[in-house]
Image: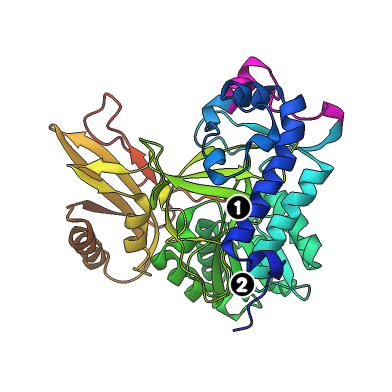
């Protein structure tokens, strides 16, 4: 396999040398931050860090305090509109974006020309690892709103010299037609939306497997690393499906190489750790903590992402020494659903449901009935015997998770579709209701 790299020297560097480069980049970043960034100057000096050269080793690094999204949000609430995590004067920032707001109030994030170029390089790494080149035509099936993912992916395409085609302002039907009309070779969108475009194409009498698409790059959800979802997408599109991970406040930190053995962490631009979310101690599986090394203007240092991951330190066949994540982002640390004492990750449910090509869309409702926790899946079945498929799904979940669930068949098209992050899991147990509230399709 002809593996591709943006920077083969850094991406295949030995671990000791790589860590020395990471520490040097951190020191260079900390120098201006400690001088002019009010948020981190106070935070770091309180922890006894007054000079950048105080961080000489990774043991020193681990003494730096964690940063949380709540801290950043509170800072912006107290010092609106941008907070105090700014290393430069406002006039030096050229871009503003915001988080999706799915886990609280949107966080405003600013970039200078320098940090915007860093974003583009991070995305260029994503493309090169998946085998995208200047010969490709990349279609962005997004609205191009204030969320940074659309714009940074677009900039990354410019860095590698690929043609960019925006799907902003288009309906899903128009996007499907554009993919054929422009002979698009690479699709960038959420995994949920890739599946939705498959539904739209089928309704329009078009077969996406016959399009020019050869590579799909997906972000915003864990789906592209979920085996059932990946297999479904690759079948619909007849194209390779690659996972990517990032966050507005952090950067484009994860990419999957052509070996498809889990996303690599872009350790040339980020320092990453995995910790026990309760104790903060190093762990093989737990919460991902990241420091970005190229966003001096609005940095995050030892940022607790809230993402649950499992670290894989084995050398990848692509030759990269960057560590990988088994199964990508497993889910949110606080996103595990406990049903009758059983820990259920939403990704585990999705992996099972996506093994059934007859299912179009699905939604999970968790509620309490007569003091017992119950889980119900509402599924749209497009072909075959709906009752038989419902029974098969229930059996698979029972066998895999030792959990009995109710399956309710609903008419096709009644469950919500999502252009961005899907919200399929609803936990109603915190409300005063004792039964699941009625939703479309009940």
Residue 408 drawn at (x, y percent): 26, 52
Could you tell me if residue 199 is visible in this image? Answer: yes
How busy is the neighbourhood of tag 1: few (under 14 within 10 Å), some, or many (20 plus)? many
**Residue at x 76%, y 26% (from the top left corner):** 35
Q: Distance between the residues labelled 2 and 1?
A: 20 Å
Residue 20 drawn at (x, y percent): 64, 53
Image quarter (top left, top right, bottom left or bottom right) of the C terminus: top left
Q: Is residue 334 left or right of residue 266?
A: left
Residue 176, picture quadrant:
bottom right
**What's drawn in magenta, residue-wise?**
72-91
Which of 278 and 394 lies nearest the eye of the viewer?
278
Which residue is under mark 2? 215
Q: Is residue 172 above or below residue 216?
A: above
Which is nearer the N-term, disc 2 or disc 1?
2
Kindly state the secondary structure of the residue where label 2 is placed: strand
Residue 298, picture quadrant:
top right
Image quarter (top left, top right, bottom left or bottom right) of the N terminus: bottom right
Residue 312, picture quadrant:
bottom left
Residue 301 drawn at (x, y percent): 60, 37
Which of 79 and 422 lies nearest the eye of the viewer?
79
Q: Is residue 34 above or below residue 322?
A: above
């Amino acid at each position: 396999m002809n593996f591709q790299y943006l920077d083969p020297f850094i991406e295949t560097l030995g671990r000791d040398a790589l860590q020395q480069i990471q520490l040097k980049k951190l020191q260079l970043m900390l120098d201006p931050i400690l001088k002019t960034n009010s948020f981190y100057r106070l935070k770091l000096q309180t922890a006894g860090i007054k000079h950048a050269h105080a961080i000489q080793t990774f043991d020193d690094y681990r003494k730096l305090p964690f940063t949380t999204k709540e801290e950043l949000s509170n800072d912006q609430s107290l010092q609106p509109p941008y907070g105090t995590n700014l290393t430069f004067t406002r006039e030096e920032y050229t871009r503003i974006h915001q988080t999706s707001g799915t886990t609280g109030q949107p966080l405003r994030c600013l970039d200078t020309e320098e940090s915007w170029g860093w974003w583009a390089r991070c995305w260029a790494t994503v493309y090169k690892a998946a085998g995208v080149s200047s010969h490709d035509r990349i279609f962005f099936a997004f609205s191009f709103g204030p969320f940074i993912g659309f714009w940074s992916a677009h900039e990354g395409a410019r860095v590698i010299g690929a043609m960019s085609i925006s799907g902003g302002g288009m309906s899903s039907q128009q996007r499907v037609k554009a993919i054929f009309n422009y002979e698009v070779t690479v699709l960038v969108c959420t995994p949920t939306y890739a599946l939705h475009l498959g539904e739209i194409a089928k309704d329009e009498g078009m077969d996406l497997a016959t399009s020019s698409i050869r590579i799909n790059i997906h972000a915003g959800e864990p789906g592209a690393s979920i085996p059932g979802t990946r297999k479904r997408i690759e079948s619909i599109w007849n194209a390779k499906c690659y996972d990517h991970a990032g966050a507005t406040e952090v950067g484009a930190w994860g990419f999957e190489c052509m070996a498809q053995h889990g996303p690599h962490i872009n350790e040339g631009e980020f320092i990453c750790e995995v910790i026990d979310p309760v104790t903060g101690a190093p762990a093989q599986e737990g919460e991902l903590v990241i420091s970005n090394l190229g966003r001096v203007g609005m940095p995050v240092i030892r940022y607790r992402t809230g993402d649950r991951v499992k670290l894989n330190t084995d050398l990848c066949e692509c030759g990269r020494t960057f560590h990988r994540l088994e199964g990508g982002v497993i889910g949110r640390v606080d996103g595990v659903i406990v049903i009758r004492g059983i820990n259920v990750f939403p990704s585990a449910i999705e992996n099972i449901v996506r093994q059934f090509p007859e299912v179009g869309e699905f939604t999970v409702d968790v509620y309490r009935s007569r003091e017992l926790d119950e889980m119900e899946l509402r599924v749209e079945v497009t072909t075959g015997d709906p009752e038989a498929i419902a029974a098969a799904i229930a059996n698979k979940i029972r066998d895999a998770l030792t959990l009995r669930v109710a399956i309710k068949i609903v008419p096709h098209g009644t469950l919500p579709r999502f252009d961005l992050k899907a919200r399929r899991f609803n936990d109603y147990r915190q409300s005063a209701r004792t039964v699941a509230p009625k939703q479309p399709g009940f």
